[in-house]
Image (cartoon, rainbow, N blue to C red):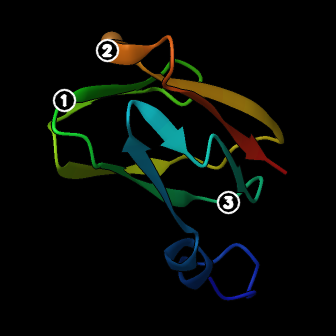
Amino acid sequence: MASVMGISAAAAAENAFTLTIKDHRFEPAELRVPANQPATLTVKNLDATPEEFESKSLRIEKVIPGNSEATFTLRPLKAGRYKFEGEFHDNTAKGEVIAE
Ligand SMILES: [Cu+2]
């Protein structure tokens, strides 16, 4: 993404992040986003089986069918760590959004 920062609609549009699910693991497992800015997060499930992307701290819970994707709006996050997991494979599918 571009290095333009600042709280504006343009910045929000540029704060777009992607996670993939493959073999029931997230890549990257740690996703760094700028604190205090809105962002969008697209989760691409590359596995053939569905996964439920779930994060209490991010207030997201959604089933993503196999070989599909979903896009979420992240509210502006205070600096910190926000865990997420794939509820259907929570022994392997874990990660954190790190707002900084
Ligand atoms: Cu759930």
Amino acid tagged 2:
Phe
Disc 2 and disc 1 in contact, CB within 8 angstroms: yes
> First in sequence: mark 3 or mark 2?
3
Does the closest atom of ligand 1 sit within 8 Å of the Cβ of label 1?
no
> First in sequence: mark 2 or mark 1?
1
In this view, the residue in front, 52 or 15, is 52
The x, y position of residue 44, in whole percent, is 32, 52
> First in sequence: mark 3 or mark 1?
3
SS class of the residue under badge 3?
loop
Relative to residue 97, is residue 55 depicted above or below?
above
Label 3: few (<14), some (14–19) or many (≥20) C-alpha neighbours in 10 Å: many
Residue at the spot 56% in from the left edge and 84% down from the top edge: 10
* Residue tagged 1: 50
Label 1: few (<14), some (14–19) or many (≥20) C-alpha neighbours in 10 Å: some
* Residue tagged 3: 37
Residue at the spot 76% in from the left edge and 77% down from the top edge: 6
The x, y position of residue 82, in whole percent, is 67, 30
Relative to residue 20, is residue 8 depicted above or below?
below
The x, y position of residue 34, in whole percent, is 75, 59
Disc 3 and disc 2 in contact, CB within 8 angstroms: no
Residue at the spot 70% in from the left edge and 72% down from the top edge: 7
Amino acid tagged 1:
Pro
Q: State the separation of the CA atoms marked 3 and 1.
A: 30 Å
Amino acid tagged 3:
Gln
Numbered label attached to residue 88: 2
SS class of the residue under badge 1?
loop
Q: Nearer the viewer, mark 3 or mark 2?
A: 2
Does the closest atom of ligand 1 sit within 8 Å of the Cβ of label 2?
no
Q: Quadrant of ligand 1?
A: top left
The x, y position of residue 54, in whole percent, is 42, 23
In this view, the residue in front, 2 or 48, is 48
Q: State the separation of the CA atoms marked 2 and 1.
A: 8 Å
